[in-house]
């Protein structure tokens, strides 16, 4: 009997960095959080759609990809956290509902707290610089944090089952 067929499917949760190839306007600091199957190249699809719909030459770079069971939950949780940063600039393109402006508020606050803790004088300026990095650091942190929570839950359940299975021996 194959017990693995009872497990739900696992899919990849990804974070993309969308950046222009020909020029560097700050209005195009965008990131994308979503999920994909094993056999799809989502980055190429998003890149093609932006080029066809808006005529912008962009490079969609995968920053991170994590294979998880709760892919929808993780994606929706990150979308809800970043809801205030949602971007309508690429409306009509593939995946435009998953595209957010990049402003690393969480990373900036952590930097500010750590720098104040160590007594660094320019803590606020350093935190501001971290917040303005045109790279989806916060999105990566949120996806990895939620994937880590899933792995901890799976490990705890597995250890519970193994422990109680050996109780009967």
Image (cartoon, rainbow, N blue to C red):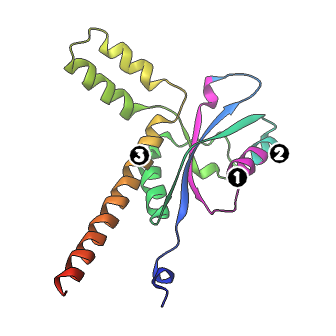
Q: CA distance from mark 3 to mark 2?
A: 31 Å
Q: Is residue 73 above or below residue 23?
A: below
Rendering coords of residue 4 (x, y %) = 48, 80
Marker disc for residue 142: 3
**Magenta-colored stretch includes residue 42:** yes
Q: Earlier in the sequence, mark 2 or mark 1?
A: 2
Query: Left of 12 or right of it: where is 23?
Result: right
Q: Quadrant of residue 18?
A: top right
Q: Residue furthest front?
A: 169
Secondary structure beneath label 1: loop
Contact check, label 3 and label 2, Cβ < 8 Å: no
State yes or no: residue 23 in magenta.
no
Side of 164 relative to 59 (left or right): left
Which residue is rendered at x = 24% and y = 82% of the image? 165
Magenta residues (range):
26-48
Q: At x 44% / y 18%, what residue is drawn?
A: 129
Residue named by callout 2: 52
The answer for how far apart the CA atoms under marks 1 and 3 are is 23 Å
């Amino acid at each position: 009997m194959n017990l693995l067929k009872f497990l739900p499917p696992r899919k990849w949760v990804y974070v993309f960095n969308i950046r222009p190839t020909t020029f560097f306007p700050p209005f195009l600091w965008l990131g994308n959080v979503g999920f994909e199957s094993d056999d799809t190249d989502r980055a190429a699809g998003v890149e093609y759609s932006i080029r066809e719909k808006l005529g912008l030459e962009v490079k969609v770079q995968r920053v991170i990809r994590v294979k998880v069971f709760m892919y929808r939950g993780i994606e929706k949780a990150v979308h809800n956290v970043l809801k205030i940063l949602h971007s309508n600039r690429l409306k009509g393109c593939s995946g435009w509902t998953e595209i957010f402006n990049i402003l690393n508020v969480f990373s900036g606050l952590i930097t500010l707290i750590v720098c104040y803790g160590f007594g660094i004088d320019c803590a606020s300026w350093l935190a501001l610089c971290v917040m303005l990095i045109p790279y989806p650091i916060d999105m990566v942190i949120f996806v990895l944090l939620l994937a880590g929570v899933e792995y901890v839950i799976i490990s705890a359940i597995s250890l519970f089952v193994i422990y109680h299975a050996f109780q009967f021996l």
